Amino acid sequence: MRQFTPKRQKHNRAVQPIRDQFADDFPECMVCRGNRQAYTHEISQGPARRLSLGERCALLRLCEQCHRWVHAEWSIEEQLALKGLRDPEYYDRVHVNQLRGKAPDAIDEGEVWEALSTVMGRIR
């Protein structure tokens, strides 16, 4: 099992209720809608991922197969479009940009709308 620093363990405990509620709200994959076990995926990657662990606007629920696919082939814009479709109440493109250490409009709404047609062709 992976070992975390005490600081990281404390952070993980603090965000766990948010992640648990999100998992309860979305027990199935947001892409394929399959009933296979879904995992919580953070839209923000790299150093920004830790900041996103407890930010519902930056979370998706994906099965293992779709999770690999999203990592390999989906842009951030496409992931944000999926978030807007499946969890619109918590869609916040500006905050996701900021979590990623980018300007609030680094990805603008027009780019997410453009990605929507691609996403619509990929999901069930």
Image (cartoon, rainbow, N blue to C red):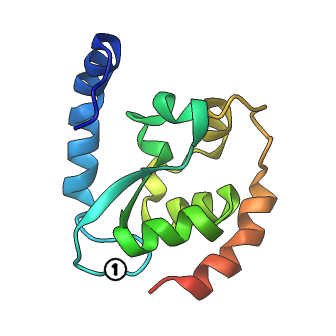
- Residue at the top extreme? 7
Pinpoint residue 119: horizontal percent, then vertical percent. Answer: 61, 77
Q: Nearer the viewer, residue 8 or 28?
A: 8
> Secondary structure beneath disc 1?
loop
Pinpoint residue 49: horizontal percent, then vertical percent. Answer: 52, 36
42 shown above or below 60 = above
12 shown above or below 59 = above
Using the rendered view, name the quadrant where residue 81 is placed.
Answer: bottom right
Left or right: 116, with 57 as reference point: right
Residue pictured at 79% horizontal, 60% vertical: 111
Residue pictured at 28% horizontal, 37% vertical: 18
Left or right: 123, with 98 as reference point: left
Name the amino acid, label 1: Arg
Which quarter of the image is occupied by the C terminus? bottom left
Using the rendered view, name the quadrant where residue 96 is placed.
Answer: top right
Pinpoint residue 24: horizontal percent, then vertical percent. Answer: 19, 55
Pinpoint residue 106: horizontal percent, then vertical percent. Answer: 80, 41
Q: Nearer the viewer, residue 2 or 37?
A: 2
Label 1: few (<14), some (14–19) or many (≥20) C-alpha neighbours in 10 Å: some
Residue pictured at 34% horizontal, 79% vertical: 33
Total marks placed: 1
Which quarter of the image is occupied by the N terminus? top left
Residue beneath label 1, please? 33
18 shown above or below 29 = above
